[in-house]
Image (cartoon, helix red, strand yellow):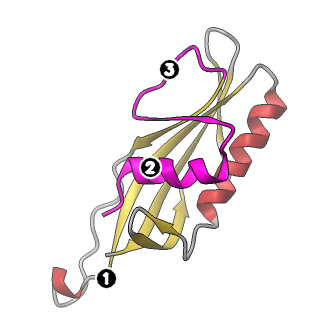
Amino acid sequence: SVKTKDVMQYLKKAFPDVKFYVGKLFENEKKCITVYNRDGKSRDIALGGADCTTTEQKGIRILVRNGTRYSDCESLALDVYNAIAKSDGEVIGNNIVCCAEMLDGEPQDVGTDENGVFERVIRANIIYER
């Protein structure tokens, strides 16, 4: 099954110049991406039971931080959003992605931290082959 760390590793390949974290934000980072687990919707079981079910899903939340310029954060967050949204057929962990269900139309602006670093959040369900 896909783990939160697997999603981070997938994104790291696309954004090698950004620091990545899983489950914990390091406040002193001005440019970083943190991937968090997020409860997805309840598991869909195929008619015929679990043995006939071919997909599972991983709920994720991604926090993108990028400097003190709004446009820099917006640009990086959109690039990350698109990397997840267009992950169909990609391998995350050891699983092939069927599709990504993006829960918002774009990365959500959550303002700045106490140091003026802009932040955006991306929420998604990654549906993958079992």
Q: Considering the image in quadrants, where does the C terminus appear?
A: bottom left
Q: Amino acid at mark 1?
A: Thr
Residue at image coords 76%, 38%: 74
Q: Which residue is mark 3?
A: 26
Label 3 to label 2: alpha-carbon separation: 18 Å
The mark lying in front, picked from 3 and 1, is: 3
Q: Amino acid at mark 2?
A: Ile
Callout 2: helix, strand or loop?
strand
Q: Determine whether 115 is above or below 25 in the image.
A: above
**Residue 81 position within the rendered picture, expressed as x and y whole percent measured from the top left:** 65, 52
Label 3 to label 1: alpha-carbon separation: 37 Å
Compared across the picture, whether 71 is left or right of 54 comes to: right
Q: Is residue 5 magenta?
A: yes
Callout 3: helix, strand or loop?
loop
Residue at image coords 42%, 28%: 24
Viewer-proximal residue among 59 and 25: 25
Residue 5 makes an appearance in the image: yes
Range drawn in magenta = 1-30
Q: Is residue 23 magenta?
A: yes
Compared across the picture, whether 127 is left or right of 106 comes to: left
Residues tagged 3 and 2 counted as in contact (Cβ below 8 A): no
Residue at image coords 65%, 36%: 18
Q: Amino acid at mark 3?
A: Phe
Q: Determine whether 128 is above or below 53 in the image.
A: above
Compared across the picture, whether 119 is left or right of 99 comes to: right
Q: Which residue is mark 1?
A: 54
Viewer-proximal residue among 122 and 34: 34
Q: Which residue is mark 2?
A: 60
Callout 1: helix, strand or loop?
loop
**Residue 15 position within the rendered picture, expressed as x and y whole percent measured from the top left:** 66, 46
Q: Earlier in the sequence, mark 3 or mark 2?
A: 3
Q: Earlier in the sequence, mark 3 or mark 1?
A: 3
